[in-house]
Amino acid sequence: MFMKADKKEVKMTEKTGKKVGVGITAEKDELSEWFTQLLQKAELIEYTNVSGCYILRPRAYSIWEKVQKYFDDKIKKDGVKNAYFPLLIPKSNLVKEQKHVEGFTPEVAWVTRAGDTELAEPLAIRPTSETIMYPAYSKWIRSWRDLPLRINQWANMIRWEFKNPVPFIRSREFLWQEGHSAFATKEEADAEAKRIWGFYADVYREMYAIPVLKGKKTDKEKFAGADYTLTVEAYLPSGKSAQAATSHCLGQNFSKAFDIKFKDKDEKDKLVWQNSWGISTRSIGIAIMMHSDDKGLVLSPNVADVQVAIVPIFKDDKEKKVVMEAAEEVKSSIKNFRVELDGRDYSPGWKFNDHEMKGVPLRIEIGPRDVKEKQVVLVRRDNGKKENVKAKDIKEKVSAALEDIHNSLYNKADKLLKENLAKAERMADLLKLLEAKKLVLVPLCDNPACEDELKSQTGGAKTICIPEEQPSLGGKKCIICGRPAKYWVYVGKSY
Amino acid sequence: MFMKADKKEVKMTEKTGKKVGVGITAEKDELSEWFTQLLQKAELIEYTNVSGCYILRPRAYSIWEKVQKYFDDKIKKDGVKNAYFPLLIPKSNLVKEQKHVEGFTPEVAWVTRAGDTELAEPLAIRPTSETIMYPAYSKWIRSWRDLPLRINQWANMIRWEFKNPVPFIRSREFLWQEGHSAFATKEEADAEAKRIWGFYADVYREMYAIPVLKGKKTDKEKFAGADYTLTVEAYLPSGKSAQAATSHCLGQNFSKAFDIKFKDKDEKDKLVWQNSWGISTRSIGIAIMMHSDDKGLVLSPNVADVQVAIVPIFKDDKEKKVVMEAAEEVKSSIKNFRVELDGRDYSPGWKFNDHEMKGVPLRIEIGPRDVKEKQVVLVRRDNGKKENVKAKDIKEKVSAALEDIHNSLYNKADKLLKENLAKAERMADLLKLLEAKKLVLVPLCDNPACEDELKSQTGGAKTICIPEEQPSLGGKKCIICGRPAKYWVYVGKSY
């Protein structure tokens, strides 16, 4: 029913004769068509009459709940506390940090009226919360004893982008967590930003079964108001990258703008060093795009709400009684997993398709003959493999299969990533590699004009990240201007 | 430092010579002063420059997290699924159900601009989500097989009330859960509304240690668009009631407006029966007002983030070493509770006050002599009682004390409630009882004009709820118009 995005693109190209890659927009439409169908048929997303705002249906929201729990436990153990800050930010707050306001103002949704009353000052719906949180930080922080202050919130954000909205990936409203920390020293801030960066890679590896590239954003691509931005990036089967989560060192930019000072042990007044960091419901979209196939959704077991669906097979009421009893027994034998016994009034074949569409990692089929032979049939969603399993081995086999599904998905994504990493030092090579949808490491200087030029010469590719592990630069020249390069940076198409 | 609201009001009355109760507003200001101080000194709330929008600091938010967990587990076990619906609702959705739009329009915050672009249609920030959820319900529900549909979301709401805002109790932004169900029959809807009503009473009893009155709202006070509203109400030491959570039977009002039909087993198209139900962060305010005292916050152990604070007492480094070692041992012996070992660089006395202000239910003091005698001192926040406890008994004693604190708080609140219930059949008696801050059961007819008249004659008292357990009406007359009464209803001042 579905085609994988990359397959479809190839087909499309054959049909239209258009060159895939540089400057071609068909792929985006194609992806969007495939993705749109999948999201609706797997009951993940419902569209509304507000463009760019989507309903996260229970099957999607439950993924988010699992990621929340995992990450929330991690940061609480690390000493972070949760809080909640107001949705609405007065315009006068928003404009306090110059770079920040420039970065966000174009996409702010403004509340200008309440009931019939025009508001004296327009209120922004938070696109991110620095400017509503930091005036409070300025009140709360007085002394070195008040530091570090590390607060996180789980909340909804609005960024009214005028680009083509895509559910999860670029929606006008999204859910995320945003951590906001203040430290006495730059060293502590740097260390936290790095640690959280690692947590984000953990989320993708452990929960979504996705390997990420860890790197730093270029100055041009960093968060508006940050000193630097650490990012994790995912490479998707469509050949595009997606920024997957970011951890920003804000330096003292906001503490200057919001006057966040503390009296240090040496009795001197000092500005705090700040970080902010976030991961959003975009991550769900990344996971869906990464693993899903032509039968629908494929989910890693750790985020799947139902990990095992038991489908009973019977012809008449007599068989039904026997099979349902055995199925209940199977269910209770694996109750430490998330199991659904599908007793709905539909045919087994219909149910197989339904669970495949909805991404249930494992299916257990059980019919009268299986009951007689004290066995079940175990079917994997990721590769379709079937296995007869003896009743006494079910728990162990299910556990092993779920673990293996996680690892297989991860390894497949890792292979995809590694096969698509490339390197170029000349524009002609870069263009050829981009056309083949590679993620290309190039030497670049740090002049923002070179990044603009890069984008224009490649028909929209941009710098993805300066990877943590840098090959030697050894006198390499910037691929654009030919002056000495400052770093190796990945270049590719991205969402 | 603090006075209990009711005490202060009495004082105020003595000083000003004003009559307490009917028509007197000093009590509100007084409560607000006491409450405001408490919320800030206990680090629960921070004010912002948006009137009526408050920061829920970690100590307040952690209460909400515990209530969320408790209620979320309960409704999931009952078959409800979580989802997330958009924040913004087009004006055209909002106006579809006539009573509903009349009820909410005056307090809607409107988004009219995004970036520099005026929106074609204003978007309401949800005051409640019926009108963004039910168009989707209309798409999802086709057949009796799709029912019941029971979805909940945890989300932020905005109701731009122009009354004096009070943190938690009447804030313009609040957090809540809203459950929205659709059923094939009225009976199922009635049964769910009742069950959820019971869950809300459970939340107050089990988590907040508060008894509630269960009743039905009068037609005048019910939810805008509902057939009827079930409510739980708390009676506070200030002498006012607070609506604590509500469960609404919407009947077919919204299914008509949003065309939510299903094909039943008999092949006929029918409208679904709907409920909606919610509990909000107002509940935190109710709990704070109920239990707190002149030393600051008092919290029931089940919602306290820190249940036990261990305060080490020492004079020098030598003592410190011995005491801290023993304190660590104590901590690990009670690690199944939420324990904080307070190693901060402040005096023990300062810490005692701090933990009392912040409502930590139990304090353990441990000094050099305690170490020698293999004991600690256990101090209860609710009644200040101290007890020497042998090291080997700590776990058991802490467990028993936390349970007893919960029960004591509940019983005290229950005594307060019972002592303040009264009954009146004549206006003169009602006025006298309201003046004494009683919650008064009166016979009333169901004419809304009588409720208006009641409010006006009593200087602002209103109907709180028609209690579940109704005394016999036996020919009683409406306290306002003298025609036959329809029910006994509680009347009092309320937030």
Image (tube, coloured by chain):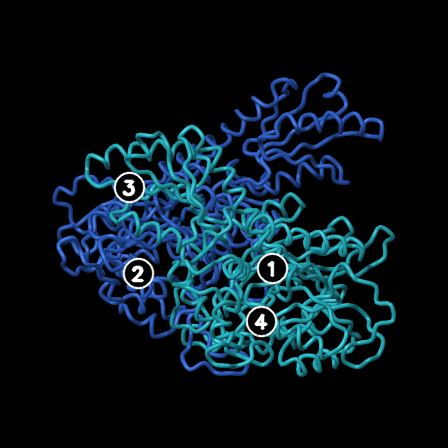
Chain colours: A blue, B cyan
Quadrant of residue B269 in the image? bottom right
* Spot occupied by residue B379 in the image (x, y as percentages of width and height): 42, 44
Q: Which residue is mark 4?
A: B90
Q: Which residue is mark 2?
A: A140
The mark lying in front, picked from 1 and 2, is 1
User: In terms of depth relative to the viewer, which is nearer, B334 or B380?
Assistant: B380
User: In terms of depth relative to the viewer, which is nearer, B475 or A487?
Assistant: B475
Q: Is residue A338 left or right of residue B390?
A: right
**Label annotation for residue B416:** 1
- For badge 2, the amino acid type reads Trp
Q: CA distance from mark 4 to mark 1?
A: 46 Å
- For badge 3, the amino acid type reads Ile
Is the residue at mark 1 from the same chain as the one at mark 2?
no
SS of the residue at dot 3?
loop
Q: In the rendered image, which quarter contains the N terminus of chain B?
A: bottom left
**Label annotation for residue B313:** 3
Q: Chain of mark 2?
A: A
